[in-house]
Amino acid sequence: MRFKKHCILYCLSMLLGFLVSAQSKTLSESKRLANGKKVYSMYCLACHQADGNGVPRLNPPLAGTDYVTGSKTRLIDIVLYGLTEPLEINDEVYNNPMASHAFLSDQQVADVLSYIRNSFGNKAGMIAATEVKKQRNRQPKK
């Protein structure tokens, strides 16, 4: 009987630890998304708009495009190194250059990209600051 009580207590403590860990992860993701929204409001909103739909033929949409939900490294490179060549998204060409935002910290880039990848109807994975750091330390694609 005593062994059974210990097993039950052990299982309950493991479950509680798992729940606290999961809640902590969710809170930290929520905080990162909130921080990302702040960075977006400061540096991205003017061109990509509050709804993420951009400006036709000038600034591309961030909603519903694989440039946002697809390759993380391509998206990180665009933020770090800017973009000067025309970009075709959803059969529309966008010509307005995007300046480099390499002045943002790795965490700020990760947070804003995670926010974009999970806003405007997008559902994609979070981006870690370590992924941004790795791309920052590589030579940009020419």
Image (cartoon, grey):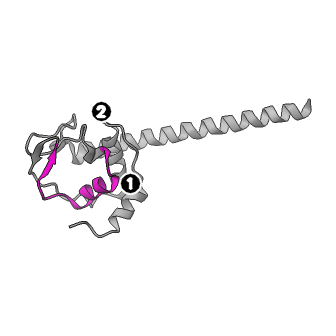
For label 1, the crowd category at 10 Å Cα-Cα, with few meaning under 14, some 14 to 19 and many 20 or more, is some
For label 2, the crowd category at 10 Å Cα-Cα, with few meaning under 14, some 14 to 19 and many 20 or more, is few
User: Disc 1 marks which residue?
Assistant: 107
- Residue 29 to residue 84: above or below: above
In the visual, does 80 lie left or right of 126? Answer: left
Q: Residue at x 34, y 63 (%)?
A: 135
Q: Which residues are magenta?
A: 69-89
User: Disc 2 marks which residue?
Assistant: 121
Q: Position of residue 33 (x, y in %)?
A: 38, 41
Q: Position of residue 8 (x, y in %)?
A: 79, 31
- Residue 35 to residue 76: above or below: above
Does the CB distance between marks 2 and 1 fall below 8 Å?
no
Q: Position of residue 46 (x, y in %)?
A: 16, 43
| Label 2 secondary element | loop
Give the amino acid type for the residue marked by disc 1 in the picture. Answer: Gln
Q: Residue at x 52, y 41 (%)?
A: 25
Say the numbered circle drawn on residue 12: none
| Label 1 secondary element | helix
- Picture quarter containing residue 129? bottom left
Q: Position of residue 6 (x, y in %)?
A: 84, 35
**Residue 75 located within the stretch drawn in magenta:** yes
Q: Residue at x 24, y 37 (%)?
A: 63
- Residue 48 to residue 136: above or below: above
**Residue 96 located within the stretch drawn in magenta:** no
